[in-house]
Image: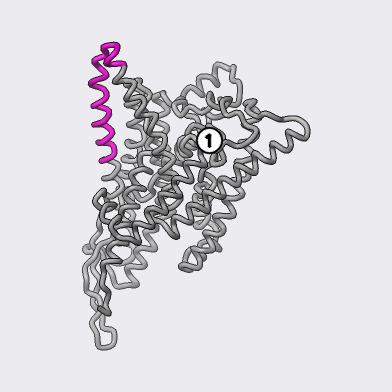
Amino acid sequence: MLQTFKNAWKIEDLRKKMIYTFMILVIFRLGCKIAVPFVNPEALQSMLSVGDGNMLGFLNMLTGGAFANATIFALGVTPYINSSIIITLLTVAIPYLEQLSKEGEEGRRKIGKITRYTATGFGAALSIAYYFLLRRQNALLYTEGLAGWFSAIVIIASFLAGTMLLMWLGEQIDKKGVGNGISLLIFAGIISGASTTVKIFVDMIKDAIQNQKTQNFILVPLFIIFGIAVVAFAVILSKGERRIPVQYAKRVVGNKMMGGQNTHLPIKVNMSGVMPIIFASALVSIPGTISRFVNVTSPFWISFLSVFNYNSFLYAVIYLLLIIVFNYFYVSIQYNPVEIANNLRKNNGVIPGFRPGKHTQDFITKVLSKITFIGALFLGVVAILPIVVGNITNTGIQMGGTSLLIIVGVALDTAQQLESQMVMRHHKGFLK
């Protein structure tokens, strides 16, 4: 991967794109430090602990700490992500959107426009909700009279303008830079939070030297080895696929013999990406978030909410089960065995050993079910293993599965795009 970036840097056109992308990421990080007026973010710190299974802490992790500091990019690209997920799901349910998805580039452009409008609506709603959260936490300088109304308008408008600017910056990366713009913005936010983990390692080493805690000299290398192993596991998960062999029958078209080639139908182990983890994280963190806003005194509800504590065993089990369920759900709306079998029949393609039609459909469904389960299990392991290790060692080092898979996925996708663009530039073409 490093060699890919090194080779791309030698090509002037790609070098300009990489610099352009880097400058936009710098703008993003600068915006994460520009505070919104009339806000005292220190009042929010007690609510934004990722280790308590809090949705607000999860959002703060995705924004690289901008949410906790109430900056103009506090909402990050979360409204756009929510909008994209919902529009993707509605594409299956609403015939108009389904038709647009089949109209090629023009249809994708219209769906993108609908997604942006929806994201703007989500951004407005989240900006208002965040304002009332700040007000409830006594983090506002003015709440009464004309000054209160003016500060409310400024704060809400700042949050909304920030998230719309991020959407625009992400689109500029797509057009003039390298990689997927929205993914790279999330990537930059997560990477910026790595300094906390580095600080914990440094503190452990200092503690080992000053207080003679020899176990820290063992724990630090073990954590590094464990981190490398998890990243390698995530890479295998992202790149792994099952290839079903497909044979196309020969046919005569005019005076030429067409077809007859052998190929394969790839089914990725992780077809749904990080979406199941995002869905599961959002759902399982709702009770922990509610407990932040409501003063619970009933013993029953205290026991119930303790189940959803980030450090509990049941939290990890529920988290794993939700990931498996959401993975099956997401794959079922993205992958249609009936449509695949029909397309193979129309193009005179067959899977060796299975007759076209119902038998091919049943075989693809069976393979898809097995691969989906394996992929869901791998996703669950990647998601909960860092949590389990962090809780066992009690060091505070906890890298969630979502952030890990996003980092690995975005890095691999960006490197793949650079490789494809280098191949295009070195290809001489048919005229030469």
> From what the image shows, is residue 129 above or below residue 428?
above
Q: Residue 268: x, y in percent? A: 31, 52
Q: State the extent of the magenta-drawn residues as a range.
A: 207-232
Q: Quadrant of the C terminus?
A: bottom left
Residue visible at 65% across and 33% down? 38
Q: SS of the residue at dot 1?
A: loop
Q: Residue 159: x, y in percent? A: 60, 42
> From what the image shows, is residue 157 above or below residue 5?
above
Q: Residue 254: tell me if it is visible.
A: yes
Residue visible at 34% across and 72% down? 346
Q: Quadrant of residue 320?
A: top left
Q: Residue 20: x, y in percent? A: 42, 54
> From what the image shows, is residue 319 above or below residue 297?
below
Q: Quadrant of residue 265?
A: bottom left
Pick out the residue farthest to the top.
211
Q: Magenta stretch containing residue 209, yes or no? A: yes
Which kind of residue does numbered mark 1 sit on? Phe
Foreground residue, 14 or 292? 14
Q: Residue 24: x, y in percent? A: 46, 49
Q: Magenta stretch containing residue 56, yes or no? A: no
Dot 1 corresponds to which residue?
A: 67
Q: How is the image coloured?
A: one colour
Main SS of the magenta part reads: helix
Pick out the residue farthest to the bottom.
255
Foreground residue, 348 or 123? 123
> From what the image shows, is residue 57 above or below residue 78?
above
